[in-house]
């Protein structure tokens, strides 16, 4: 059975010293302090340690073989978005990262599918890089759940989404820059609480902002099984019904009606939760995801799904069919 992991992250082994080049900012750089590992540094501050499976394409393929998974959809790590930077500098960072991903895809076309990153803070430059991403063989883009604290429904982002629909470029929305992060540093709460909330924030913003009404062919996937959106859809719908004067000001379509019109990945870490998401969303709109190679991900690449009591057809949907539809790809190109 073909398995495609629709949510993985990758970096080049070497990153430029962008802070020195641009003369400001805490751009991420790598310190290769020991064999097979590197420190991600944010200015002079340690951000996290990554292992060689974050940059070694052949090692990644071997690790995926253990879980009978043939294809990885790769995108950068959200901290690399750099939306806070000057737009032209963010564009330079994006180009470097996108060229690396395109090179990986070119070398291993049966094993990798690429998503780019673009300077969302500047629509003109974002569309420029989006068009280039398509030309170099990337199948979509990854964007943050907010852009410098602005929600995705803001009108200045609409031309970017419009260009994605026109170009046939898919979107993965990934949480980052989590709301309340400064107030909840302890217990890893930004990742455990903030990330699910951020994804729901993005989904609600796009739904209530009418993005899917205006762009019905836009193909959007929301990370981490939609975050807290799925478990709170009852509350969200009730708010829409009881206070339309606050909620339905830009779009009068019930948010529940959008279930099954976008994609979410399978990262729930819980078969019961995934069963619930399947009931809401249907397997044709759920993509296998792992968040590889990071520890908070599903690093057994869908093993718990293989053990679930669902039909073989449903498993095939999650493992490959839904991702192929999201990215508008043909299964045959990945059959070896």
Image: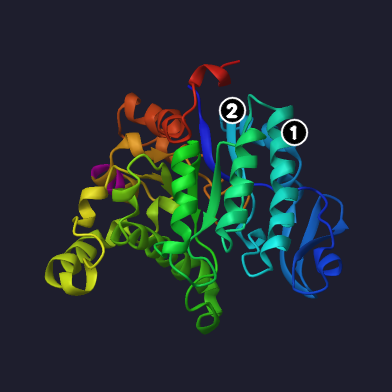
Q: Are marks 1 and 2 in contact (CB under 8 Å)?
A: no
| Residue 134 drawn in magenta | no
The location of residue 81, given as percent across then percent down, is 63, 60
| Real-space CA distance between mark 1 and mark 2, rounded to the nearest whole angstrom | 12 Å
Q: Residue furthest bottom?
A: 183
The location of residue 3, given as percent across then percent down, is 51, 29
Up-down relation of residue 129 to residue 138 (above or below):
below
Q: Main secondary structure of the magenta part?
A: helix
> The residue tagged with tag 1: helix, strand or loop?
helix
Neighbor class of circle 1 (other Cα within 10 Å; few <14, some 14-19, many 20+) is: few
Q: In front: 67, or 328? A: 328
Res 36 seen here: yes
Q: What scheme was used to colour the molecule?
A: rainbow
The span picked out in magenta is: 275-279
Tell me the tag on residue 58. 1
Query: Which image quadrant is residue 251 in?
Result: bottom left
The location of residue 223, given as percent across then percent down, is 46, 52
| Residue 276 drawn in magenta | yes
User: Which badge, 1 or 2, is on the more N-terminal residue?
Assistant: 1
Res 302 seen here: no
Q: In front: 86, or 307? A: 86
- Please report the residue visible at 48 percent of the width from the left and 22 percent of the height from the top: 1
Residue named by callout 2: 70
> The residue tagged with tag 2: helix, strand or loop?
loop
Q: Residue furthest left?
A: 242
The location of residue 164, given as percent across then percent down, is 48, 44
Horizontal placement of 189 versus 95: left or right?
left
- Please report the residue visible at 50 percent of the width from the left and 52 percent of the height from the top: 160
């Amino acid at each position: 059975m073909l398995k495609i992991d629709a949510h993985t992250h990758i970096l080049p082994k070497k990153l430029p010293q962008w802070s020195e080049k641009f003369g400001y900012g805490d751009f991420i750089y790598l310190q290769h302090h020991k064999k097979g590992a590197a420190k991600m540094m944010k200015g002079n501050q340690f951000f996290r340690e990554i292992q060689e499976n974050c940059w070694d394409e052949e090692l990644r393929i071997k690790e995926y073989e253990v879980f009978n998974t043939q294809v990885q959809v790769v995108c950068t790590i959200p901290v690399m978005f750099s939306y806070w930077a000057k737009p032209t500098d963010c564009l330079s960072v994006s180009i470097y990262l996108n060229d690396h991903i395109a090179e990986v895809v070119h070398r291993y076309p049966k094993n990798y599918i690429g998503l780019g990153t673009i300077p969302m803070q500047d629509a003109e430059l974002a569309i420029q890089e989006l068009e280039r991403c398509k030309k170099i063989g990337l199948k979509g883009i990854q964007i943050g759940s907010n852009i410098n604290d602005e929600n995705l429904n803001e009108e200045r982002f609409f031309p970017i989404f419009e260009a994605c629909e026109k170009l046939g470029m898919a979107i993965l929305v990934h949480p980052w820059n989590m709301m309340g992060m400064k107030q909840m540093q302890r217990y890893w709460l930004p990742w455990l609480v903030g990330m699910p909330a951020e994804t729901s924030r993005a989904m609600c913003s796009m739904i209530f902002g009418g993005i899917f009404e205006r762009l019905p062919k836009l193909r959007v996937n929301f990370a981490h099984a939609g975050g807290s959106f799925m478990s709170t859809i009852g509350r969200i719908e009730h708010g829409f019904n009881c206070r339309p004067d606050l909620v339905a000001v830009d779009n009068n379509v019930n948010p529940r009606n959008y279930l099954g019109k976008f994609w979410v990945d399978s990262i729930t870490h819980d078969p019961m939760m995934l069963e619930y998401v399947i009931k809401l969303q249907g397997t044709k709109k759920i993509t296998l995801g792992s968040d590889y190679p990071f520890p908070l991900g599903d690093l057994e690449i869908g093993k718990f799904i293989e053990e679930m009591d669902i039909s073989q057809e449903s498993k095939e949907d999650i493992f490959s069919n839904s991702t192929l539809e999201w990215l508008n790809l043909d299964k045959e190109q990945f059959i070896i």
